[in-house]
Image (tube, grey):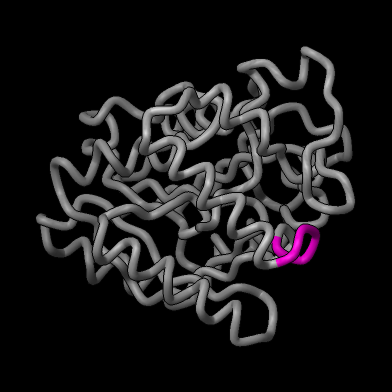
Amino acid sequence: MRLSVIIPTINERANIVSAIDSAWGAGAAEVIVVDGGSSDGTAELAQANRGCVVRTQPGRAVQMNEGARRAQGDLLLFLHADCRLTEGVGVQLAAATENPAVAWGAFWQRIDAAGAAYRFLELGNALRVRWRGMPLGDQAVFVRRDYFRRLGKFSLVPLLEDADFAARARGVSPPALLPGPVIVSARRWKEAGIIRQTLRNWRILYGWRRGRSIDDLARSYRRHDQCDASGGAREMDSTVTGHRDSDRGPLRP
């Protein structure tokens, strides 16, 4: 199948080249970088490194939907800018999608840091996919384009668009979990601390499952370039805390 890799970005100059290169190395037919208003030259750098750059309003759901709309491939893969695909991913996708029952899925992670705690997190996230059918965005979610359109794309919410999509998708078809791995930046855990960041993510997911407003939950989770040294939220003005600014860091329970 023709693979389209879609990378939503905002202020990801340090990571975008390696993300694009990894997509080409995994066999992508096209790499679409959807920039939500970077001020650090991310879009220009992506364009100089063979990325097809599209500019939109900020918001990960908005950006990924626009990338999917423009994609020409039969298979869409949504890659966070601080993640990298490994070479075997393309072969795994080709083999998995020979089975028409495989409509969507994600990959095992490899967090880019040493230590048993990170290996435990990787295992826990894989088991979440196997047992609950709930991959999140930093596991490089892939989906057949026709299935994506059938499900109605990503909901335009300020947080948890990946969990919302997974909840709808698993109701129709279980996700495949491929070995990958997808390499994931450890920046959030290193900034805030493994325990603190993990508990924060669990609290947000628990609140969402209990029906708490996503707008309320989003106030405690800021995108990577809007965090203080502890990984918490800086004070924001209304233009940042509103609905449009939804390109927050990946949730990693």
Q: Position of residue 38 (x, y in %)?
A: 80, 33
Could you say which quadrant of the image residue 88 lies in? bottom left
In the figure, is residue 106 to the left or right of 25?
A: left
As drawn, the residue found furthest toward the top would be: 238
Q: Position of residue 139 (x, y in %)?
A: 46, 60
Q: Residue at x 43, y 35 (%)?
A: 208
Total numbered labels placed on residues in the image: 0
Drawn side of residue 98 relative to residue 246, left or right: left
Is residue 131 positioned above or below 64 on the image?
below
Residue 144 position within the rendered picture, expressed as x and y whole percent measured from the top left: 27, 46
Q: Is residue 87 left or right of residue 55?
A: left
Q: Bounds of the magenta span?
A: 189-193
The residue shown at (61%, 17%) is: 243
Between 14 and 224, the residue placed more toward the observer is 224
Q: Main secondary structure of the magenta part?
A: helix
User: Residue 5's x, y, as percent?
Assistant: 48, 50
Can you tell which quarter of the image residue 119 is in? bottom right
Q: Which quadrant would the N terminus be assigned to in this image?
A: bottom left
Q: Nearer the viewer, residue 186 or 12?
A: 186
| 46 or 105, nearer to the observer | 105
Q: Is residue 177 magenta?
A: no
Quarter occupied by residue 151: top left
Q: Residue at x 51, y 79 (%)?
A: 120
Q: Looking at the image, which residue is at 51% across and 44% down?
A: 6
Is residue 174 placed above or below 171 in the rendered structure?
Answer: below
